[in-house]
Image (cartoon, helix red, strand yellow):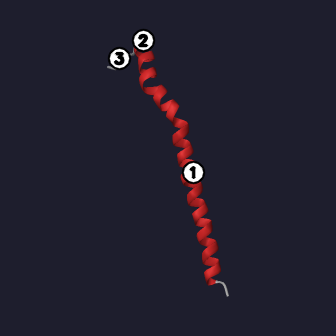
Amino acid sequence: MIEKATPAEFEAWQEVELNWWAKKQLNFVALATLVQLSALGFMFLSFFLLSLAFSS
């Protein structure tokens, strides 16, 4: 059977576990966004360079 947490246990869990992730979440999202945009930029750069290399 699952035991329910007391309000004090929940507050302690929120302070130790949840707040850490909440504070770091924006950094993780920003880093992932930069990686995605960099990959998209390199892809377009590759298309452009390939079109120059193989155009008549």
**Is 51 drawn above or below residue 8 in the view shown?**
below
Furthest residue in direction left, as rendered: 1
Earlier in the chain: of badge 2 and badge 1, it is: 2
Would you name the residue on which mark 3 appears? 3
Q: Secondary structure at mark 3?
A: loop
| Residue 34: percent from left, percent from top | 57, 51
What residue appears at the point 51 percent right and 30 percent down from the top-left corner?
Answer: 22
**Is 11 drawn above or below residue 22 in the view shown?**
above
> At label 2, which amino acid type do we have?
Ala
How many C-alpha atoms fall within 10 Å of the one at disc 3: few (<14), some, or many (≥20)?
few
> At label 3, which amino acid type do we have?
Glu
What residue appears at the point 47 percent right and 32 percent down from the top-left corner?
Answer: 21
Image quadrant assignment for residue 1: top left
- Specify the label residue 8 is tagged with: 2
Q: Are marks 3 and 1 in contact (CB under 8 Å)?
A: no
**Is 54 drawn above or below residue 48 in the view shown?**
below
Spatial CA distance of label 3 from label 1 is: 42 Å
Q: Are marks 2 and 3 in contact (CB under 8 Å)?
A: no
| Residue 13: percent from left, percent from top | 41, 21
Would you name the residue on which mark 1 appears? 34
Spatial CA distance of label 2 from label 1 is: 39 Å
Furthest residue in direction bottom, as rendered: 56
What residue appears at the point 66 percent right and 84 percent down from the top-left corner?
Answer: 55
